[in-house]
Amino acid sequence: MAFEDEVYDVSFIAGEALTSYQYHFVYLSADNTVKVVSHATNQKPIGILQNAPADAGVARVRIMGVSRVIIGTGTFAFSNYVGSDASGHGIAEDTDTYNYNAIAIMGGAAAEKGTVLLFPVRTISKA
């Protein structure tokens, strides 16, 4: 069973309807609102959305600490680096890929809730 432990949450304005995106990775857009991360466009996630606000509502984002995350395609397991797919889901990353800002504490399969430890984003360049 996934769990969480709040350490550092920050409130932002939702830049789009996020009512279906609780426990998804979000990024801070140019207009200082949060939106769901699209890994394909190399947006750097700032954290995981903890609530489900409407457009222009208050979005509570966990930027450091332990959080649940909805798992994307495939699985991830304890100690995997975790980043975001094009839908804001958590996916296993390796150190040869782009951005990750979490390590799995408890994994699972696609569409399940996993648990991650969030830390400031780390960018790794492909060799």
Image (tube, helix red, strand yellow):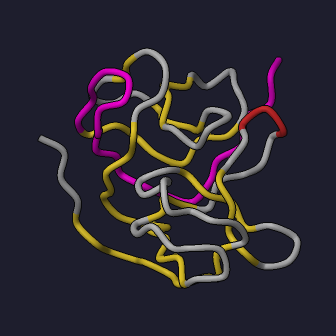
Q: Quadrant of residue 6?
A: bottom left
- At x 79%, y 32%, the residue is 40
**Outermost residue toward the right in this view:** 30
Say which of 98 and 14 sits in front. Answer: 14
Residue 124 among magenta residues: yes
Tell me: residue 115, above or below residue 67.
Answer: above
Q: Quadrant of residue 56?
A: bottom right
- At x 40%, y 27%, the residue is 80
Say which of 31 and 97 sits in front. Answer: 31
The magenta segment = 106-127
Give left or right: position of 14 versus 22.
right
Give left or right: position of 59 versus 87.
left
Say which of 108 and 66 sits in front. Answer: 108
- At x 38%, y 23%, the residue is 110
Give left or right: position of 97 versus 61.
right
Tell me: residue 52, above or below residue 114.
Answer: below
Q: Main secondary structure of the magenta part?
A: strand
Tell me: residue 118, above or below residue 112.
Answer: below
Counting from the top left corner in percent of width and height, residue 79 is at 33, 30
Counting from the top left corner in percent of width and height, residue 27 is at 68, 60
- At x 31%, y 51%, the residue is 68
Quadrant of image for the N terminus: top left
